[in-house]
Image (tube, rainbow, N blue to C red):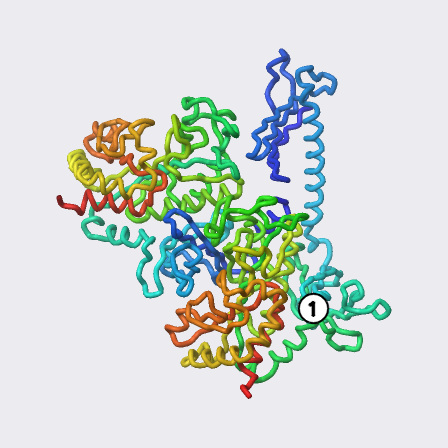
Amino acid sequence: MSYRLSDLINLDLSACTDKIIAEYVWIGGSGMDLRSKARTLPGPVSDPSKLPKWNYDGSSTNQAPGDNSEVILYPQAIYKDPFRRGNNILVMCDSYTPQGDPLPTNKRYNAAKVFSRSDVVAEEPWFGIEQEYTLLQKDVKWPLGWPIGGFPPPQGPYYCGTGADKAFGRDIVDAHYKACLYAGINISGTNGEVMPGQWEFQVGPSVGISAGDQVWMARYILERITEMAGVIVTFDPKPVSGDWNGAGAHTNYSTKSMRNEGGYEVIKKAIEKLEKRHLEHIAAYGEGNERRLTGKHETADIKKFKWGVANRGASVRVGRDTEREKKGYFEDRRPSSNMDPYVVTSMIVETTIVWKP
Amino acid sequence: MCYILYVFVLCLDLEWRWKCVAKDADDDEDEDRIGFVITLGYDFDMNISVLLPASPFRVSISRLSYLVCVAKQFIYAAIYLIMALLSDLINLDLTDATPKIIAEYIWIGGSGMDLRSKARTLPGPVDDPKKLPKWNYDGSSTGQAPGEDSEVILYPQAIFKDPFRRGNNILVMCDAYTPAGEPIPTNKRCAAAKIFSNPDVEKEVPWYGIEQEYTLLQKDINWPLGWPQGGFPGPQGPYYCGIGAEKAFGRDIVDAHYKACLYAGVNISGINGEVMPGQWEFQVGPAVGISAGDELWVARYILERITEINGVVVSFDPKPIPGDWNGAGAHTNYSTKSMREEGGYEVIKKAIEKMGLRHKEHIAAYGEGNERRLTGRHETADINTFLWGVANRGASIRVGRDTEKEGKGYFEDRRPASNMDPYVVTSMIAETTILWNKS
C-alpha cells in the first residue's frame, strides 16, 4: 500500500469537521459470518441508545427474502474504531424484523433477557473467554507457516514458542492485542497455542451480556486485521485432522456466591447441574465439536462429562487456587472456537442460577 | 562508523527493517556492523540476514551467496529513499512559504463519463466559485471540439477542498461552454441547473441520496480485484458487507475514499461492500438540487484519483461480469418538501405513478448498457417492466418500510445504472414528478 494511500486513510478529520464515521457490525445468516457497513454521523456519540437504528439487505445475508428484505439493526455497544481512530466508532448490533421481532439468528436477544433477570443480576456473573483460532494461508487454506503440501514437525515446541520456525503470524496477534485495548475491549492476554499457526486471546472478566459483545467485536477486529495481512482466520474447531490440537473457547465463569466465602460448595453444586444438562449444552456449544472433543489433545470425550481440579482432560476444570482458597471460578472446556458467546454465557447462567432440577 | 537505522516501511508488499546487529558468530572480533533482516510478507517466509562488515573488503566467503540478494535489497532501499523524498515534496505545506494556492479544475469529457482535470496557480485562497476565473481547454483532445476551433471554456461551479494537496488547495467542479457562451452538447449540467432553478422546483427543495456502486479491476488484465486470473471466486453470498482477506478486496481504497471525500466537503453518508466480490458502494447525500450532481461527480473524481494511486482500475460499467454476478447501479433516493411532511405518502404515490407513465423516457436516460443489468434477477426489475413496492428489492422503485409506517418520507428509484449522469437523472426525476403533467 503506497504512502499516499496511507496519508488518506490516516487523515485526521477532527480538524475539518465534527462528523464521525460509525461502522455498524452484525452477525449474518450462518451465525458465524460477521458483516459491517459504515455511515456518517453528525458528531461524536458515546451512548448506544443515542445511535440511530439502521437497516440492511437481509436477502444478501440469508436472513430475509428478496421481496421483503429489510432487516433492522439495533445498536447495542460502542467501541473506538482502531482502524479509523479519531472519534470514529465500531458499533455492535443485533438484527430484528421491521415489526421488532428478533431474527432467528439473533442470539443476543434471549441472552439479554436471561442476563436481566433479577436473580441473575444479583449474582453478577463474570466470564473470561479463551478464544482460540487458526491462521491460514490465503488461497491454499493451509495453516500459516506450514509447508505447502506437507506438515511441520510434531507439536511440542510451539506452545508459547518464539522463533521463525515456531511462531507464525505474531504480527497479527500483536496488532490485534493493541487494537482491542484501543477499542475498549477487555482483552486480558494472548498466547501461542500447541498447534503451530494457532493462537489464543482471552477476553474478560466481563459481566453478563458484555462478554458476548466483546468477544464478537474482538473477532471482528481480528478478521479485519487478517484481511489487511492477506491471511485467513478460521474458527473451525478441528482445522487439521490427526495429531494436531483443535481450537476451543474455554469459558471461565463465576458468580458472586462463588467468589465469596463458601464459594467452593456453590461451585460444586453448579458443576453438578451442568453435568445433568451435558447433552443440551454440547448441542449448543458449536458446530463440528465432535471432531475436536475426542478425549485426546487436552479434551474430554464429547459424550462424557467429567470434572476435576487442574485436569485439562476434563469437561470442567477447577483451578488449584480455587480449591485451596475454597472460592473462585471454574472453567468449562467444552465450547468450541466457533461457539456463539451469547448462547454459551447465557446458557451457563441459566443452568447454574435459574434452572431448578 | 556504525549506522543505527531502525525503519519500518510498508512498501510494495515488502516489510523490511534495518537494525544494528550484534557481533558475527564466525569472527572473534567485536565489530560494528550494518545488518538487515528482510521478511518478505507472509506468502514466502524468507528471512535473509546479511552481515556486512564495516570495511567493504572483509566479506567472508560464507556470505557470498547472499550478495545477489543484497544487491536486490539495495535497489529496494534506493526505491524507498526516492519515495521518501517524493512524499516529502508531495506533502510540502506551502502555506508558510506563499499565499498562492493550486486549483484543480475538473470537467466531464466527450464520452460523458471520462473525467478530466488540470491545475492552475491562483494568488490566494478562494471559497466562492463565482470569484474563480473561467478557464479553457483543448476540446479537440477530448472529443468535444474540432481541431480548427478547439477552445472549450470552463465555468467554475463548485469548490471542494483538495484531499491530495491539502492546505488551502482546492478542487473545482466545472462545466463546458463554447466561446460564444453556449453549453456544449455533452454539458448536461446546464439544462439540469435550469430545471432546479424553476420556482416550482425550488420551493419543493428536492433532496437526493445517490448510492454509487462501482467495481475495482486489476490493472492490465481488467479482471475484478481479488479474483483469480483466468478463474472465478466462490459464488455470491459471503461478500455483501463481508470482512476477511478472502471476502473483501480493496478496502484500503474504499476507506481512503471515505475520508478523502469527507475532507473535501462531499456529503458522503456511508459505504458498504457489495454482493459481487470486488464491488463496493458509497452514498452521497442528502444533497439539494444541483449539488447532488456536483458532489457525485467530484466523489467519482476522487475515487478514480485514489485507484490511480493504488494501481487499480475503477469501472462504472453496469454489468462488468455477465452471468450469476450482480451488476452495478446508482439507486437514487428522492424526496420533496411535500413528501417529507404530513400526508407525504400520498404525494409519493402520485409521483411514482407519473414516473411509471414516463418509464421508457427515464430508462433511455439512465445509463448506457443498462439492459445487461436490468434483467429481473440479481435484485433488479426487468428493464421493460415498471414495478414498485415496499421493501421490494426486485422493483423499479422501492419505498422503505419507515416511509410506509410514518406516512411520509422518500422513495428509491433503483433503475439508474452506475454509469448514469447524476445531472440528468436528478433533474429528470424532479421534472417528471414536479413539472410534468399527465396529458
Task: Report whether residue A262 is seen.
Answer: no
**A51 shown above or below B11:** below
Q: Chain of mark 1?
A: B
10 Å crowding of disc 1: few (<14), some (14-19), many (20+):
many
- Rendered location of residue A143, percent (x, y): 47, 33
Instruction: From the image, tell me which residue sits under label 1.
Output: B174
Task: For the N terminus of chain A, give its image quadrant.
Answer: top right
* Number of residue marks: 1
Task: Report whether residue B142 is seen.
Answer: yes
Q: Residue at x 60, y 23 (%)?
A: B21
| Image quadrant in which you'd find residue B150 | bottom right
Q: Does dot 1 land on a helix, a strand or a loop?
A: strand
On the picture, is A353 further left or further right than B360? Answer: left
Pick the front one: A307 or A58: A58
- Rendered location of residue A278, percent (x, y): 21, 38
Pick the front one: A91 or A273: A273
Q: Residue at x 37, y 36 (%)?
A: A237
Seen from this angle, which residue lies furthest bottom? B439
Task: For the C terminus of chain A, give its image quadrant.
Answer: top left
